[in-house]
């Protein structure tokens, strides 16, 4: 076992940070952004999210049918989109489909808007239906760490209207757990709170994998200490609220 020292500022970084109207994006480190693989695109995502999106698109042979519309945005760009949307479509539409600058998932580099490849694509509300190639994408998305972030019927929870085109990278096994229980990220953050670290983790099991997911509250001081088994793979992510989500691979696939 090894004791890690986590500055409490780390609660604002990681694949599972919750960014919404109540919790603004606070991390300013964007050194891990890369361009999405594909022709004629300057759209960027966090490195791991970009790689897995590329793998998924290749898996379903969607490169010429689905196109990335919007990935990482700076706060300044988000402000421009907000202002333009209010001017062109009004405040009600903008509040429903555009996050307030500083509170947008696109600023994390973990969110991607996708659309069917067409001559004209709506930048704010691209077409991404629930059939055809888009259905194939959704069926496999969770296995590559992606979830549809703003599903229909959850508007009061997410604070954003139904956006079938907006996907968020949260990683494995989190995307699979969220999909299994039909949870938004807001609900998943609350769900994991019931599984305290080193006491009663949530165990995800599938095809020989055993993965423990648990919550650790941040210390009231400036640093949080956590003991981890460094002989096994693990990941740490802040939740952007008050603590950390710890993911531990306890048994390898096929073992």
Image: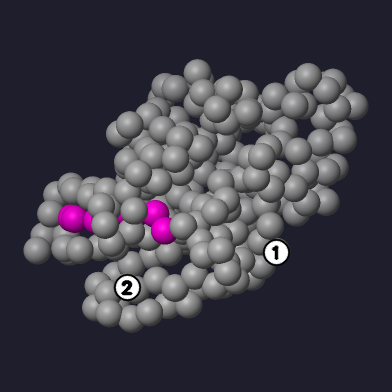
Q: Residue at the spot x=65%, y=45% of the render?
A: 23
Q: Do tag 1 and tag 2 residues touch (Cβ < 8 Å)?
A: no
| Label 2: few (<14), some (14–19) or many (≥20) C-alpha neighbours in 10 Å | some
Point out residue 133 in the picture as x, y percentages from the top left corner.
Answer: 42, 31
Q: Nearer the viewer, residue 93 or 63?
A: 93
From the viewer's perspective, tell me whether residue 211 is left or right of residue 87.
left
In front: label 1 or label 2? 2
Residue highlighted by disc 1: 28
Q: What kind of element bears circle 2?
A: strand
In this view, which residue lies farthest toward the bottom? 2
Residue pushed farthest front?
220
Identity of the residue drawn at 44% across and 30% down: 134
The mark found on residue 228 in the picture is 2
Q: Position of residue 130 (x, y in %)?
A: 44, 22
At 50% across and 57% down in the image, what residue appears?
Answer: 243
The dot on residue 196 is: none
- Work out whether 96 lies above or below 26: above
For label 1, count other residues whose C-alpha is less than 10 Å away and answer few (under 14), some (14-19) or many (20+). few
> Which residues make up the magenta segment?
209-216
214 drawn magenta: yes
Is residue 221 at least partly visible in the picture? yes
Q: Earlier in the sequence, mark 1 or mark 2?
A: 1
Q: How is the image coloured?
A: one colour
Residue 151 vs residue 45, the one in the foreground: 151
Does 28 sit left or right of 164 as displayed?
A: right
Q: Based on the picture, tell me whether residue 235 belongs to the magenta stretch.
A: no
Eyeballing the image, is 33 above or below 2?
above
Label 1 element class: loop
Residue ranking furthest to the left: 255
User: Residue 254's image quarter?
Assistant: bottom left
Q: Tell me the quadrant of the picture where the N terminus can be found.
A: bottom left
Q: Picture coordinates of residue 20 (x, y %)? A: 64, 40
């Amino acid at each position: 076992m090894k004791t890690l020292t986590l500055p409490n500022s780390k609660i604002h970084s990681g694949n599972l940070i919750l960014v919404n109207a109540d919790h603004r994006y606070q991390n300013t480190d964007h050194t891990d952004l890369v361009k999405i693989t594909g022709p004629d695109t300057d759209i960027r995502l966090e490195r791991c999210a970009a790689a897995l999106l590329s793998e998924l698109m290749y898996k379903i042979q969607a490169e010429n049918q689905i196109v990335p519309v919007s990935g990482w945005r700076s706060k300044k760009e988000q402000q421009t989109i907000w202002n333009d949307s209010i001017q062109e479509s009004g405040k009600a539409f903008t509040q429903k489909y555009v996050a307030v600058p500083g509170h947008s998932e696109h600023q994390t580099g973990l969110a991607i808007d996708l659309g069917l490849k067409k001559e004209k694509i709506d930048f704010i509300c691209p077409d991404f239906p629930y059939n055809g190639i888009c259905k194939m994408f959704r069926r496999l998305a969770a296995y590559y760490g992606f979830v549809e972030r703003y599903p229909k019927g959850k508007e009061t929870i997410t604070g954003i209207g139904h956006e079938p085109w907006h996907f968020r990278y949260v990683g494995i096994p989190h995307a699979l757990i969220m999909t299994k229980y039909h949870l938004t990220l807001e609900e998943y953050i609350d769900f994991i709170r019931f599984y305290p670290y080193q006491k009663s983790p949530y165990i995800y099991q599938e095809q020989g994998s055993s993965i423990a997911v648990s919550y650790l509250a941040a210390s009231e001081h400036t640093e949080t200490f956590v003991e981890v088994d460094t002989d096994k793979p693990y990941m740490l992510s802040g939740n952007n609220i008050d603590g950390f989500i710890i993911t531990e691979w306890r048994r390898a696939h096929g073992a």
